[in-house]
Amino acid sequence: IYTASKFAVRGLTESLRYNLVPHGIGCSLVCPALIATNAWDSAFRRPEAFADSGFGEVDRTSLTKFGAVFSAGMDPHEAGRRILSGMSEDRGLIFTHPEFAEDFKAIYEESLAALPDEQAPPERLEVERLRREANRAALAGRVISIDDLS
């Protein structure tokens, strides 16, 4: 549930960015990694009213062991500084940590390898050209409409 909701927020944020920027409203996807917080122990603080929420009993030993990992996290103030900097620069993507480069490279390579090795028809290429042009226009501040895609 946690990962699926994060992916949904990514799609929503990317869509909002193109639709809101022409109105002077910035929208950034913030992707922090491990931060030195006590977020790991939230299960210990679950209100009694939610005890029957469908989550199993908390294994205190395993969760406490997992919590020790958070001590290696980035200082929250540093993460906040990086996020504020990205927002101030109106970046669409804000990554606080550098350690995902290897993952992004693998995703990129796997994505390219999954593309069919064939030429797309000119009509579809034109649709994609118009979509990219409309996205660039939106990021430049122009309100776009369905007419920009045909």
Image (tube, helix red, strand yellow):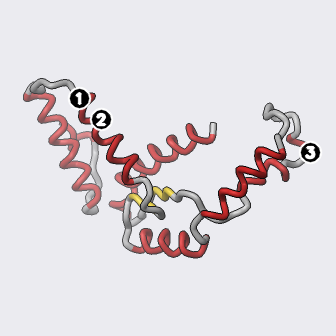
**Quarter-of-image position of residue 26:** bottom left
Residue carrying label 2: 111
The answer for how far apart the CA atoms under marks 1 and 3 are is 50 Å
From this viewpoint, is residue 79 visible?
A: yes
Q: Quadrant of the C terminus?
A: top left
The answer for how far apart the CA atoms under marks 3 and 2 are is 45 Å
Q: What residue is drawn where x is 77% and y is 44%?
A: 62
Can you give x and y, in whole percent of width and height, for residue 126 in the image? Answer: 12, 35
Q: What residue is drawn where x is 72% and y is 55%?
A: 67
Q: Quadrant of the N terminus?
A: top right
Q: Nearer the viewer, mark 1 or mark 3?
A: 1
Can you give x and y, in whole percent of width and height, for residue 78 in the image? Answer: 54, 74
Q: What residue is drawn where x is 53% and y is 57%?
A: 33
Callout 2: helix, strand or loop?
A: helix
Relative horizontal placement of residue 101, taking residue 60 as reference (left or right): left
Relative horizontal placement of residue 30, taking residue 130 as reference (left or right): right
Residue sitting nearer the eye, 54 or 128: 54
User: Which is nearer the N-term, disc 1 or disc 3?
Assistant: 3
Give the residue type at disc 2. Ser
Callout 3: helix, strand or loop?
A: helix
Residue sitting nearer the eye, 2 or 66: 66
User: Which is nearer the N-term, disc 3 or disc 2?
Assistant: 3
Asked if the residues shown at circle 1 and circle 2 are in contact, with their CB atoms under 8 angstroms apart, the answer is: yes
Asked if the residues shown at circle 3 and circle 2 are in contact, with their CB atoms under 8 angstroms apart, the answer is: no
Can you give x and y, in whole percent of width and height, for residue 68 in the image? Answer: 71, 57
Residue carrying label 3: 48
Residue carrying label 1: 115
Give the residue type at disc 1. Leu
The answer for how far apart the CA atoms under marks 1 and 2 are is 7 Å
Q: Residues within 10 Å of mark 3 (few under 14, many from 20)?
A: few
